[in-house]
Image: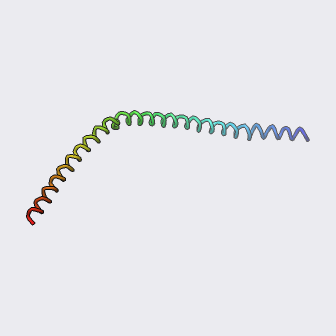
Amino acid sequence: MSETILQTLGWWIAVIELPVLSALFWMIWNSRRDFESALQLLREDLSDHKVDVARTYAQTKDLRLLENRLTAHLLRIEAKLDATALKAEKNLNSSS
C-alpha cells in the first residue's frame, strides 16, 4: 500500500506540480522583466523631462529682472495717474 501512495505521490509531483510550478516561475520571471523594462523607460522619461525643464523654464534671475521692470513701469503709471488726479482735482476746485 505504501508503494502505491509513493507512486501516486511521485506521479502527482511529476505530472501536476512540476509543470504548474514551472509555469508560475516563468510567469513571475516574465512579469519581473516587463516591470524592470517599464521602470527603465519611466526613469528615462523622467530624466528627459528634467533636462527639458532645466533647459526651457525661466531662471530665478530672469524672473527677478522681469519683476523689477514690471514694478518700475507700474510705479511710473501710478505717478502719472496721481499727477492727472491732482490736476483734475485742481481744475475742479478752481472752476467752482
Q: Is residue 88 above or below residue 3?
A: below
Quarter of the image where one finds residue 92 = bottom left
Give the quadrant of the N terminus: top right
Who is closer to the viewer here, 24 or 43?
43
Quarter of the image where one finds residue 46 = top left
Give the quadrant of the C terminus: bottom left
Q: Is residue 77 above or below residue 28?
A: below
Q: Residue at x 41, y 36 (%)?
A: 49
State the image coordinates of residue 73 (x, y, percent, origin top left): 22, 45
Who is closer to the viewer here, 84 or 53?
84
State the image coordinates of residue 17 (x, y, percent, origin top left): 74, 40
Q: Residue furthest bottom?
A: 96
Identify the coloring. rainbow
Who is closer to the viewer here, 67 or 4?
67
Q: Residue at x 10, y 60 (%)?
A: 91
Q: Residue at x 51, y 37 (%)?
A: 38
Quarter of the image where one finds residue 54 = top left
Q: Is residue 53 found left or right of 91 in the rendered image?
A: right
Q: Residue furthest left?
A: 95
